[in-house]
Amino acid sequence: EFMNQAQNQGLYAVNQDDPSGVYDEYLDTIKKAEDLYNIINPIETPYKSKYEARTILDNMVNKLDATKTIASLEKNRELMDQMNWRMAALRVKLGSISWDVEEPHNAQIELELALDYYYPNLANKINTILYENDDEFSKKNDDNNEEEEEPADYNWALYSSWK
């Protein structure tokens, strides 16, 4: 009953004691999204199923992010790490969909978010090199630089491409 009430109000109910439900939902979401992604739509609505796939992936990212927020409040680093790599994997899929539906600006945003998980601050470093003579970009980027972190050691290749 509590879960239905939360859903009806547009909220996500998070069980921080047992995240297996969100793990199962993550796997189900990927399967559903892949099935939708592979549908060939009629010419009148060429991206309909891809938009549907994007919607369910976006919803899953939001659920993972809610779970991560609760985990961070409880200082549960292991659960935060589990949510982070799953969100990054979904961001790669979202970037792929955005590219396929001819939205390169959205693809860039999603893929940079994924990249920032796998290689923190790499996108900023690349942009700094590309725009090193652009004073406005350099000033803005200097404010966003943080301490470097090591790249995540997850095998992200398993999650990074659509068939």
Image (spheres, rainbow, N blue to C red):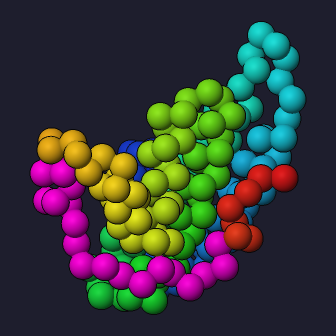
**Pick the front one: 79 or 152:** 152
Q: What stretch is highlighted in magenta?
A: 137-156
Question: Is 161 placed above or below 8 here?
Answer: below
Question: Is 96 placed above or below 65 here?
Answer: above
Judged from this view, the residue extending furthest toward the top is 44
Q: Is residue 132 left or right of residue 56?
A: left
User: Is residue 140 a member of the stretch shown in magenta?
Assistant: yes
For image coordinates 42% across by 79% down, the residue present is 80
**Pick the front one: 96 or 34:** 96
For image coordinates 85% across by 17% down, the residue present is 42
Q: In this view, does 103 lie to the left or right of 37?
A: left
Judged from this view, the residue extending furthest toward the front is 133
Residue 28 appears in which quarter of the rendering? bottom right
Residue 90 in view (yes/no): yes
Q: Is residue 102 left or right of residue 158?
A: left
For image coordinates 55% across by 30% down, the residue present is 103
Q: Count the numbered circles shown.
A: 0
Residue 65 appears in which quarter of the rendering? bottom left
Q: Where is residue 38 in the image (x, y as percent from the top left)?
A: 84, 41
Question: Is 72 placed above or below 143 here?
Answer: below
Q: Where is residue 30 in the image (x, y as percent from the top left)?
A: 71, 58
Residue 1 in view (yes/no): no
Q: Position of residue 44 (x, y in %)?
A: 77, 10
User: Is residue 90 a member of the stretch shown in magenta?
Assistant: no
Q: Is residue 28 left or right of residue 17?
A: right
Q: Where is residue 109 in the image (x, y as percent from the top left)?
A: 44, 45
